[in-house]
Image: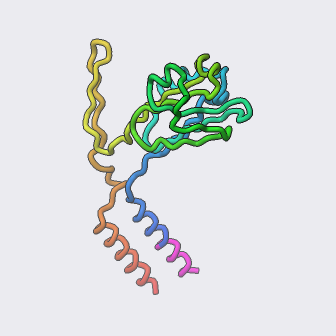
Amino acid sequence: MAGFNKMMILALVIISASSDAKWVTAQVHHVVGGDRGWDQSSDLDSWSSGRVFTVGDKIWFTYSAAQEKIAEVKSKEEYESCDMSNPIKMYTDGLDSIPLVGEGIRYFLSGELEHCKSGLKLHVEVQPKPKPNAPKVQELVGSKSVVAADGPSSPSGSAHHGGNTVLILLGFLYFILHLAY
């Protein structure tokens, strides 16, 4: 039983030591239109207002495939005029997951012209992934200047272990475990 406990301790230490891997930004899955999905009754402008779309996120379109399809178009002009004559891609499955792999604006229209002209369309501005050591950002809001503070320059002490620290910790643990024998 003592051997089992030592192995558990060693496993926990190894797992803990290996947790100093790079932090990963969570991928966000955006269901377009929320509970209503891609539907004429959805207020897509309100839904997308204030929402941040970042490289690595996914947008999900849910709709009735029997009654609807979605066209992705290239330009703002095609988007505004509901011009689907030369789409980048047509989505017709009723549940489409679209990865946001690059920065920029993407334009989606209802494949039904009357629905599109009634406002069933969405543009998504995809932002870059935030950098861990991003510099201060300053922008003007009204007549006041707003400054976003820098993030930490490196992870805090408990979240960051150098390679030497991990080796010393493992050596120490090995030494202690072998004293018991």
At horizontal 33% and vertical 72% (from top left) the residue drawn is: 167
At horizontal 53% and vertical 81% (from top left) the residue drawn is: 3
From what the image shows, is residue 144 above or below residue 78?
Answer: above
Residue 21 position in % (x across, y down):
39, 59
- Of residues 8 and 149, the one nearer the viewer is 149
At horizontal 52% and vertical 72% (from top left) the residue drawn is: 8
Q: Residue furthest top?
A: 143
Determine which quarter of the picture holds residue 98.
top right
From what the image shows, is residue 148 above or below residue 9?
Answer: above
From what the image shows, is residue 94 above or below residue 51?
Answer: below
At horizontal 38% and vertical 59% (from top left) the residue drawn is: 20
Stretch of the chain drawn in magenta: 1-10
Determine which quarter of the picture holds residue 93.
top right
Which quadrant is the N terminus positioned in?
bottom right
Q: Main secondary structure of the magenta part?
A: helix
- Of residues 151 and 1, the one nearer the viewer is 151
Residue 2 on the magenta span: yes
Residue 16 position in % (x across, y down):
44, 63
- Of residues 14 and 72, the one nearer the viewer is 72
Q: Is residue 63 left or right of residue 87?
A: right
